[in-house]
Amino acid sequence: MTEAIWRVNVNKQTVTTEPVPESWQRLAGRALIPRILLDEIPPKCEPLGPFNKLLFVPGFLVGHMLSSCDRISVGAKSPLTGGIKEANAGGTTGLKLVHLGIKAMIIEGAPAGDGWWLLHLSQEGGRFEPADDIVGLGIEESAARLREQYGDKVGIALIGPAGEMMMASAGIQNLDKDGAPARIAARGGLGAVMGSKRLKAIIIDKTDYTPPPLADEALYKDAKKRYVKALMAHPQTKTYADYGTVAVATMANGFGAIPVKNFSVGEFENIDKINADNMRDIILERGGDGDTTHACMPGCLIMSSNCFAGPDGEKIVTPLEYETIGLVGSNLGIDDFDTIAKLNQEMNDLGIDTIEMGGALGVAAEAGLMEFGDGDRAMELLQEVRQGTPLGRALGQGAATIGKLYSVRRVPVVKGQTMSAYDPRAIKGTGVTYATSPQGADHTCGLTIRAKVDHLDPTVQLDVSIAGQINTAGFDTLGACMFSGFGFSAAPPDTIRDLLKGQYGLDFGENPLQELGRETVKLERAFNKAAGFTAADDRLPEWMTVEPLPPTNAVFDVSEEDLDKVNEVFS
Amino acid sequence: MKVKVRLHATLRRHTPEGYQNRLEVELEEGATVASLLRKLNLGMEPEHLLIVTNRRRIEPEDALADGAKIDLFPPISGGN
């Protein structure tokens, strides 16, 4: 099957296919998003207006169930940051889009009326169907009804009430391999962009396995063997399977970098209650639906996901991950997994980024809207979001909006986007990433916690952040989970090059990861520059440069000269 | 001299007396992190471990002081 661009016009309700333009052929996943937006939208356009476009772009390696390499990149101009946005997710959306022969899907235009629609994609093409009967429903109920109607083998990407209300914290949920609507392209308000197109859900009706053709099957299979062997031999793979990302909690705490009570402290007094050992013990003891090891994508060998069940053994949420434990747990002064899991599931059902909402609730607590540690009040505030009350809508716009509304100075955002669960004063390389990534504050754009540097020394952070920014952008372009990185880096050097050559017959040079990663960040920065961003946007909030973070008492003191060098590297 | 060691996540199952995550280890004066790791015999290369004391990363060649508190982490990183 030849790869094609599928173009969806929500105004005319048409779906057409086009050949892939030559200048797009050597890009995929995260890298293709800024290229398409630079080519097709005015960079200064209104993110929720008719000129913005919502893109679904699978990574290069998607389609063959190569372990941890079937992720979907979703992109648009962000209503949260006003800049470029790519958020990627596991699950089955990427795999099924590729099996339909889709290189990229471009959703464009402005809807004509007030109705809500489903987009149905299959080998026969695409069509629109009314969706008014599921509007207002949460993600769980919407997905259940859609699976009943279209069968339990289809892929679904959908928005919840937050996306319908066009909140800047809204993401796009995708089904995992078992049909749970829990793999969210979370960050930057892409759910709001989908809501602005009045699309409640996309049904990907492709149930048979039709991987894309291989240009050189022998080469591909050999490279695949090398990668899988290195991945399985790496001790990281075992750690992720047994503990998942929650194992990071004690590590971040050990560096004094876990967010506590709206990023006011870096060490959590009750860390032992929200660490990996405790979570594993609870899951195993309760049994039932709980599972310490779960794969979000078919074919994944790392299986870092999990399912957290209540005392009755019934599922509360899948997955429960470190960033949520940090932002919704310690950041809100909440120290028990049951409460965190329930808040997480409520956010999932609303279709909301847990990092952004955790950040917004932390600022809300500082503003006096809740007491730190009060999970019941946090849940009440989420009901305000669901009901679309004025306060709920303010929270739904994210931490920056609620901070402005209540005149809170301590707001942990860059480019309007909430920081992940690493305080940048104690992990300063990640602070450089937060400040300078075109995506806004985001650990998946270059986390440096494992870099071999003193995280408190401001003079050694620039290079580790740049290396991280390039690497993660490279993996996002392949459609690879960031955890596959250990496998790829332990595999022989030509493995990624040979996988790409084996699949496409294209040679991406000595180091495709570096080249694709660098090209991606360059394109993203070019988009942001055209949208009006300047060096002043590549900064952490001022309060983090003057307010010491206990117990290290560090401030963010990487020089402005170093921060500005990032732009030189990528221009 | 003695140092206090905390083992995190998968590492806790490698301890000499079975399943535990807090240990006190007797070492010679001036011992390095590498000698501590040899004694613990965790079945993992030092390069894969992240070793933290007093909220800073330390490396195998670094010397340890009496009473130091050491956190050992297996290879793992974040995600949401």
Image (cartoon, coloured by chain):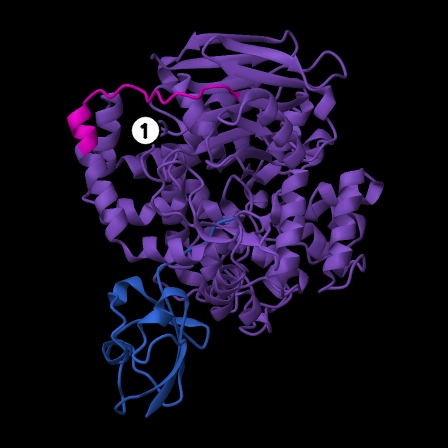
Chain colours: A purple, B blue
Between residues A333 and A309, which one lies in front from this camera angle? A309
Q: Report the front residue among B59 and A556.
A: B59
Percent from the top left, x then y, of residue B52? 40, 72
Quadrant in which the N terminus of chain A appears: top left
| Nearer to the camera, A43 or A317 | A317
Residue found 47% across the figure and 70% down from its top: A254
The answer to whether one can see residue A225 in this image is yes
Q: Which residues are magenta?
A: A204-221
A373 with respect to A498 (left or right): right
Is residue A299 one of those drawn in magenta? no
Q: Quadrant of residue A534?
A: top right
Residue at the limit of the structure toward the right, as seen here? A390
Position of the C terminus of chain A, as image quadrant, is: top left
Residue at image x 48%, y 8%? A124
Mark 1 Cα-neighbour bin, 10 Å: few <14, some 14–19, many ≥20: many
The reply to whether residue A542 is in sight is: no
Tag count: 1
Q: Chain of mark 1?
A: A
Quadrant for residue B19, please give it.
bottom left
> Principal SS element in the magenta part?
loop
Q: Is residue B62 above or below residue A366?
A: below
Residue A272 is situated, as x and y percent measured from the top left of the image, at 54, 71
Q: Is residue A220 found inside the magenta-colored segment of the image?
A: yes
The amino acid sitting under disc 1 is: His
**Residue beneath label 1, please?**
A64
